[in-house]
């Protein structure tokens, strides 16, 4: 009976050592995770400060203003191209009319009609 109790005691001691080992390992992992969590929290806080500063807002506003200005300029360029095409068309028509008048004038002088 005493041998049985000693054997049980050894088994329990082995199990307790195993539990202590696992517990120690888990405590180490928990400590590492805590350090990483603190690092990430610090990074998050720094990023929040950076993104909420007036400099960031100024930069964002300047960027949006620039985009609007680009849009206005693109629209203006488009209108200028349309205007140029219309003017070129008018110029082409004037040249055609001038050529027709010149031909009519040459034909009139060649055939003597007035």
Image (cartoon, grey):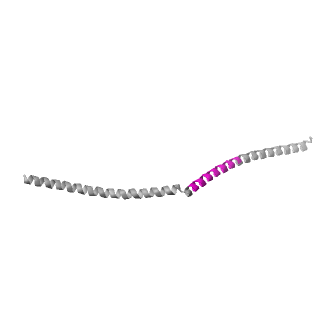
Q: Is residue 85 left or right of residue 8?
A: right
Residue 86: x %, y % from top left: 74, 45
Q: Magenta segment range? A: 57-79
Q: Nearer the viewer, residue 45 or 106?
A: 45
Q: In the image shown, does 39 or 109 lie closer to the viewer?
A: 39
Q: Is 82 on the left or on the right of 45, as rendered?
A: right
Residue 62 image position (x, y, % from top left): 60, 55
Residue 58 highlighted magenta (yes or no): yes
Q: Quadrant of residue 33?
A: bottom left
Query: Can you tell which quarter of the image residue 10 is in?
Result: bottom left
Q: Position of residue 89 (x, y in %)?
A: 75, 45
Residue furthest left in the image: 1
- x 43%, y 58%: residue: 42
Q: Position of residue 16 (x, y in %)?
A: 20, 55
Q: Is residue 100 left or right of residue 67?
A: right
Residue farthest toward the top in the current orientation of the protein = 113
Drawn side of residue 43 relative to residue 16, left or right = right
């Amino acid at each position: 009976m005493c041998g049985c109790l000693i054997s049980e005691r050894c088994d329990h001691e082995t199990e307790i050592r195993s539990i202590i080992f696992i517990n120690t390992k888990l405590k180490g992992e928990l400590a590492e995770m805590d350090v990483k969590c603190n690092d990430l929290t610090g990074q998050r806080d720094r990023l929040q400060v950076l993104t909420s500063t007036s400099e960031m807002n100024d930069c964002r506003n300047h960027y949006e203003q620039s985009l609007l200005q680009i849009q206005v300029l693109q629209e203006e360029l488009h209108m200028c191209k349309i205007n140029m095409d219309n003017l070129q068309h008018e110029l082409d028509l004037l040249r055609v009319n001038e050529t027709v008048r010149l031909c009519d004038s040459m034909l009139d002088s060649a055939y003597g009609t007035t």
